[in-house]
Amino acid sequence: MPEIIIKYKNKRALEALHDFAKYFDFEIRLPHSSRKENQIDLNSITVIPGDSSIDTSDLHEIFTGRNINPSELRKNAWKRK
């Protein structure tokens, strides 16, 4: 079967191609990417946004009374090597 590669900038173009595929009996295969859409690259480091639906109130008991503040935690725990 002959193949064609189509590059597009707009997601609406892909939606239109999917609609055409139904009527003209051709197949659309998307390349599998290991990178997910919600990942962000920042200085060659992949940053994955956190899940806002997670309930962090359970962590309150763990950190209460330990005199931990965010700036000290960043300075001591996340040292670059």
Image: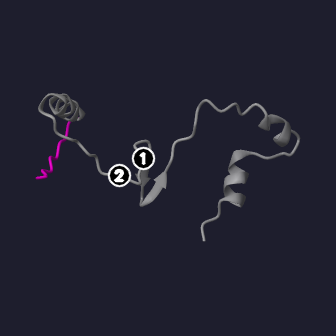
Percent coordinates x, y for residue 45 in the rendering: 46, 58
The colour scheme used to paint the residues is one colour
**Dot 2 lies on which element?**
loop
Task: State which region is magenta.
Answer: 1-10
Q: Is residue 65 left or right of residue 53?
A: right
Q: Quadrant location of residue 62?
A: top right
Q: Count all numbered tags in the image, as a single digit.
A: 2
* Relative to 68, residue 43 above or below: below
Most foreground residue, 27 or 47:
27
Most foreground residue, 10 or 15:
15
The structure residue drawn at horizontal position 88% and vertical position 41%, both measured from the top left corner, is 65
Percent coordinates x, y for residue 43 in the rendering: 42, 59
Q: Which mark is residue 36?
A: 1
The structure residue drawn at horizontal position 17% and vertical position 29%, both measured from the top left corner, is 16
9 falls in the magenta region = yes
What amino acid is at disc 1?
Lys
Q: Which residue is mark 2?
A: 32
Q: Is residue 28 left or right of residue 57?
A: left
Q: Which mark is residue 5?
A: none
60 falls in the magenta region = no
